[in-house]
Image (cartoon, grey):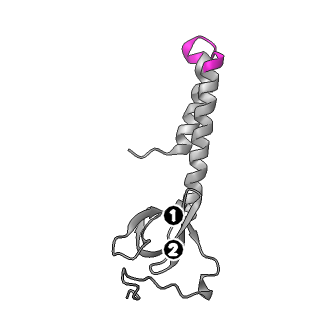
Amino acid sequence: MEVNTKILIKKLENFKNNFTDNYNRELDSDDDFTLAVAIACFEHIAEQEEAEKETISEYQEGEAVLYQNGNRFELGIVKRVCGDNEYFINYHTGDTAARTHARNLHKIANGYAFHVIRLDTDGNERR
């Protein structure tokens, strides 16, 4: 089931604002804190969703990209665009590509100045 995060935030805010009318008691501090944390979490998710919309089809097949894996970066080549902000990326010498979300990928701004060549396990250029 797909959830619209912005609608969920509004519903939580409405629940919080109308709690006394609906339940004939005030929110205690724990309830208020829990709702505030939930709203903040969903607001953060909504911001991420908006940022992801901006990256749709940002990468093209054959393009060299950087994959951020924690504090490491790995060079990869886009093998196929999957949609939904996901791409199959070749990160090594084999034919296996890993499905990777765009939020973990970074464009190489000066990629036009370089010719990136993938090698096979024997060190020969891949076609």
Is there a contact, CB below 8 Å, between mark 1 and mark 2?
yes
Residue beneath the point at 64% across and 15% down: 28
Q: What is the three-letter code of the residue carrying label 2?
A: Tyr
Identity of the residue drawn at 47% across and 85% down:
117
Residue 108 image point, x, y percent: 60, 76
Residue 21, quarter of picture: top right
Residue 58 to residue 52: above or below:
below
Residue drawn at x 56%, y 44% is: 6
114 lies left or right of 99: right
Choose between 123 and 70: the one closer to the eye: 123
Query: What crowding class fits label 1: few (fewer than 14 Cα within 10 Å), some (14-19), or many (20 or more)?
Result: many
Find residue 52 and report its horizontal and vertical position in percent. 55, 59
Label 2: which secondary element: loop
- Which badge, 1 or 2, is on the more N-terminal residue? 2
Q: Is residue 100 left or right of residue 58?
A: left
Q: Quadrant of residue 83?
A: bottom left
The three-letter code of the residue at mark 1 reads Ala
Read off the magenta span.
21-30
Residue on which the image places disc 1: 102
Membership of 114 in magenta stretch:
no
Q: Which residue is mark 2?
A: 59
